[in-house]
Image (cartoon, grey):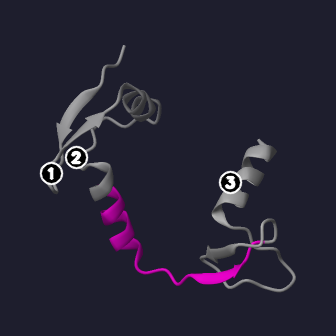
Amino acid sequence: MYEDKTLVCKECGAEFVFTAGEQEFYASKGFENEPQRCKECRNARKNSQRGNREMFTGVCAACGKEAVVPFKPREDRPVYCSECFAKMKEEQE
């Protein structure tokens, strides 16, 4: 039903593909407008509106590597690096 479309980013002028899967997702959410910005420009815009987030470092409770997290680690709660956190999340699903 949907076919990939090539669109032009209104921010940087680069072409990007609006995939059939993305179109289906947009339709399922009731969105009527196509995206106007490429993924990089959407992310940059989102991050600029959010402001700078202070990040903290800790030691991953699973693998022992350094973990960078957006909250101050506490002694009574484990901290996980992004790889171990993703593995744990996968296992729960």
Q: Residue at x 61, y 76 (%)?
A: 68
- Residue ID for mark 2: 36
State the residue at coordinates (68%, 54%).
86
Q: Which residue is mark 3?
A: 86
Q: Amino acid at mark 2?
A: Gln
Would you call the spot at circle 2 few (<14 residues within 10 Å), some (14-19), or many (20 or more)?
A: some
Which residues are the magenta region? 42-60
Give the residue pinned by disc 1: 10
Q: At 37% from the left edge and 13% from the top edge, which residue is drawn? A: 1
Q: CA distance from mark 1 to mark 2?
A: 6 Å
Q: Earlier in the sequence, mark 1 or mark 3?
A: 1
Q: For residue 1: magenta?
A: no
Q: Residues within 10 Å of mark 1 (few under 14, many from 20)?
A: few
Residue 24, position as x, y percentages in the image: 42, 27
Image-based side of 89 in relation to 38, left or right: right
Can you say which quadrant of the picture contains the C terminus? top right
Disc 1 to disc 3, C-alpha distance: 33 Å
Name the kind of residue labelled 3 in the image: Ala
Residue 43 left/right relative to 60: left
Type of residue at label 1? Lys
Residue 21, which numbered label?
Answer: none
Count up the numbered dots.
3
Quarter holding residue 27: top left
Tell me: residue 50, above or below residue 7. Answer: below
